[in-house]
Amino acid sequence: MNIDSLNSVMPFSALHAAFTVLDAAQNIERPHLRVVGVAVLFNELCKRLGIDRGEMLNKADRIAKDADSNYTYHLRALHGYIDNELKGH
């Protein structure tokens, strides 16, 4: 993978990827296992690819801030899933 390509990801593409991962994670029956599973995946991706986790989280924050002004509907849908499917369980 070209690590430099991480710097040019567009917010819409990042949100689409997030929804794709969530779609697959919905097959996991217990919500707490979805969260831990995604966290383990993120951690291992960063370690194996030599990506700083903190830098990736900062990048994700910047993408979310940009998405909040340009892709509000998509970001709200992501928030809605988290609020409705994960917080209450």
Image: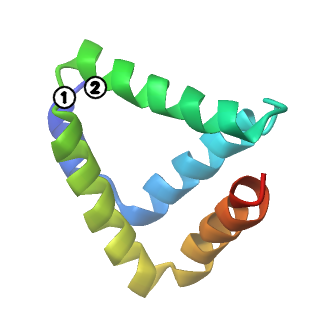
Name the element at disc 2. helix
Query: Which quadrant of the figure has residue 33?
Result: top right
- Residue at position x 78%, y 39% in the image: 26
Q: Which amino acid type corresponds to the residue marked 2 in the rendered image?
A: Cys
Q: Quadrant of residue 37?
A: top right
Residue 24 picture location, percent across and down: 72, 34
Residue drawn at point x = 44 percent, y = 54 percent: 14
Q: CA distance from mark 1 to mark 2?
A: 5 Å
Is residue 77 toward the left or the right of residue 72 in the image?
A: right
Residue 76 in the figure: left or right of residue 62: right
The image position of residue 12, as x and y in percent, is 47, 64
Depth order, front residue of 18/58: 58
- Relative vertical location of residue 72 with respect to residue 24 in this rendering, above or below: below
Q: Is residue 31 left or right of residue 35?
A: right
Residue 20 drawn above or below residue 39: below
| Image point (66%, 60%), residue name | 82
Quadrant of the image containing the N terminus: top left
Question: Do the residues under discs 1 and 2 have CB atoms within 8 angstroms?
Answer: yes
Query: Local crowd at mark 2 within 10 Å, few (<14), some, or many (≥20)?
Result: some
Query: Which residue lies under the disc numbered 2?
Result: 46
Q: In the rendering, at what x and y percent does residue 19 appear?
A: 63, 51
Which residue type carries mark 1?
A: Ile
Number of numbered callouts drawn: 2
Question: Which is more N-terminal, label 2 or label 1?
Answer: 2
Residue at the bottom extreme, as displayed? 69
Residue 51: which numbered mark, if any? 1
Q: Position of residue 34 (x, y in %)?
A: 66, 35
Residue drawn at the location 26% of the way across and 66% of the way down: 62
Query: 10 Å neighbourhood of mark 1: few (<14), some, or many (≥20)?
Result: some
Instruction: Name the residue furthest top.
Output: 48
In the displayed structure, 73 sits above or below 45; it is below
Left or right: 11, with 31 as reference point: left
